[in-house]
Amino acid sequence: MADQYTYPGSDVLVNLPGYTHPEAWKEAAVAHVSARLGDLVEHPITGDFDLAHLQAIHAALVDGFYSWGGQLRTADTGPGGTGIAHCRPEFIRAETDRVFGTLAEESFLRGRDRDAFSRGLTWTWGELTVIHPFRDVNTRT
């Protein structure tokens, strides 16, 4: 789905290094974000497990590769290969507030046994997957 995030006539996301060939772009993006994930394992970003925290993590993961790191997407995104419809951009903030509010009410899943923790994590992951707050790198964030 072409939008303001992609090069005209392409599905390649506009990126700071300037990759325009789909395979080269994907390979470079995966390598960049993977390296940044490794950095975050060593130096986690502290926060309140809320939208601002998620945005900071996203910004760190794509820093130097995309100019829109940590910014909520402003374009509709289709379901892509997953078949999962995404939240409309105008509802992203309210929906993430709902999810993170519920997570806070549930003490961020602390103190739960394995099954209860898994159910809570599954719900949170599923909700955030549907919200899809960023143009790309949502799951890794």
Image (spheres, helix red, strand yellow):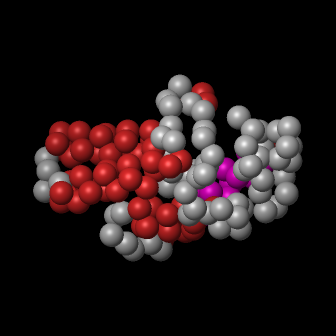
Q: How many labels does the image show?
A: 0
- 43 on left or right of 11: left
- 102 part of magenta stretch: no
Viewer-side residue, 33 vs 66: 66
The x and y percentages for residue 97 are 34, 56
Instruction: Give the position of the N terminus as an image quadrant.
Output: top right
- In this view of the protein, can residue 112 be seen by the observer? yes
The x and y percentages for residue 123 are 30, 40
- Residue 16 vs 116, above or below: the answer is below
Q: Which residue does the image show at 31% across and 51% down from the upper left?
A: 98
Q: Which residue does the image show at 38% across and 53% down from the upper left?
A: 94
Viewer-side residue, 53 vs 88: 88
**Which residue, as the protein is rendered here, is positioned at the far front?**
90
Q: Which residue does the image show at 17% across and 42% down from the upper left?
A: 116
The x and y percentages for residue 65 are 72, 62
- 101 on left or right of 130: left
Q: Is the magenta stretch mostly helix, strand or loop?
A: helix
The x and y percentages for residue 96 are 38, 53
Which range is magenta?
25-36
- 39 on left or right of 51: right
Viewer-side residue, 71 vs 29: 71
- In this view of the protein, can residue 41 be seen by the observer? no
Residue 17: image quadrant is: bottom right
- Residue 80 vs 106, above or below: the answer is above
Q: Which residue does the image show at 38% across and 49% down from the upper left?
A: 95
